[in-house]
Image (cartoon, rainbow, N blue to C red):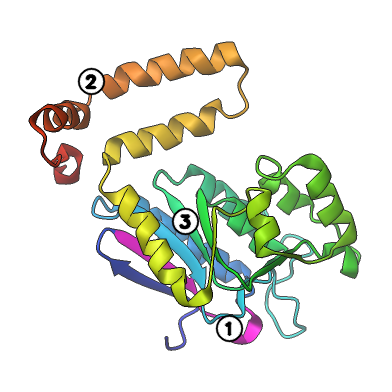
Amino acid sequence: MGDETLITETRGAVRWLTVNRPARRNAYTGALFDQMIEALAEADSDPSVLAVVLTGAGDKAFSTGADLKPDTEYSPLGLGEGELVHPAVRYFLAADAFSKPLIARVNGDAMAGGMGVLAMCDLAVAADHARFALPEVRIGLFPVLIVAALRRIIPRRVMMEMAITGEFFDAVFARDISLVNYVIPLAELDAKVEWLTDRIVNKAPMAVRRGKHAMRHMWDMNLDDSLAHAQSELVQLFATRDHAEGLAAFNEKRTPDWPSLKD
């Protein structure tokens, strides 16, 4: 993988992003967050990319969060000179705004900021040896930024226990609390991720992107507002060429040839 800290690879219609710092358990730095933000922006603007997979190098760690080694150039404890927004927050906002499916390939331990990055993915497949933790209380901190990312996924009492104990939990428990979708033996991890992405990239690209956008906005709305928003989105979806093609393909019993892929 060379000396790059973020490896970018395109596999068909899927862009793979690999955090490549295995010696540091794929810990994040401010510069690495910037690279991840840039990579998402590039994938979002590339019409040939229909989904992104985010993972870590090796089989030990997805990411253990911020690099806490004394020789790192990045401090997770506050903002750098001239910064108004924490690097992790900038990444979380970029991931939230990303319009295409973002899938976490959890190849090993996810801790602290790694849990936050995982939470900002739409789907997740974890190796069965992976462990998960919010260990900040062990060093006199509290995972306030990570809680903001996790709060829509993990039940409140479960998240409170994780945050105030800092203890590890296993991949099966992560699946049981909906933190990940699937738990798979490491040897089968790539095949399961590819199985999942294959089920995404053959669907109407415009519907997937607009649908993800709609869900993002509806998430915290009350029922009346969410139905009003959904109705507005549905009218726009009915007007797309992808819908016309999908309906025609359904009636003609053939595979759709999505017009949005040609734009």
The image shows residue 80, relative to residue 6, as above or below, that is above
Q: How crowded is mark 3: few (under 14 residues within 10 Å), some or many (20 or more)?
A: many
Camera-side mark, 3 or 1: 3
Residue projecting furthest to the left: 252
Q: What residue type is labelled 3?
A: Ile
Question: Which element carries disc 3, helix, strand or loop?
Answer: strand
Q: Mark 3 and mark 2: span between their CA atoms?
A: 29 Å
Q: Mark 2 and mark 1: span between their CA atoms?
A: 47 Å
Q: Residues within 10 Å of mark 2 (few under 14, many from 20)?
A: few
Question: Which residue is labeled 2 in the image?
Answer: 239
Residue numbers of the magenta segment: 14-26
Residue closest to the eye, 42 or 139? 139
In percent of the image, x 57 and y 55: which residue is there? 91
Question: Which element carries disc 2, helix, strand or loop?
Answer: loop
Q: What residue type is labelled 1?
A: Pro
Residue 148: x, y in percent?
71, 45
Tell me, for residue 103, which label it has, or none: 3
Residue 6: x, y in percent?
47, 74
Residue 38: x, y in percent?
44, 60
Question: Which element carries disc 1, helix, strand or loop?
Answer: helix
Residue 204: x, y in percent?
26, 39
Q: Is residue 192 visible?
A: yes
In percent of the image, x 53 and y 63: which residue is there? 34
Q: Which amino acid does label 2 sit on?
A: Ala
| First in residue order: circle 2 vs circle 1 | 1
Q: In this view, does 227 lie to the left or right of 194?
A: right
| First in residue order: circle 3 vs circle 2 | 3
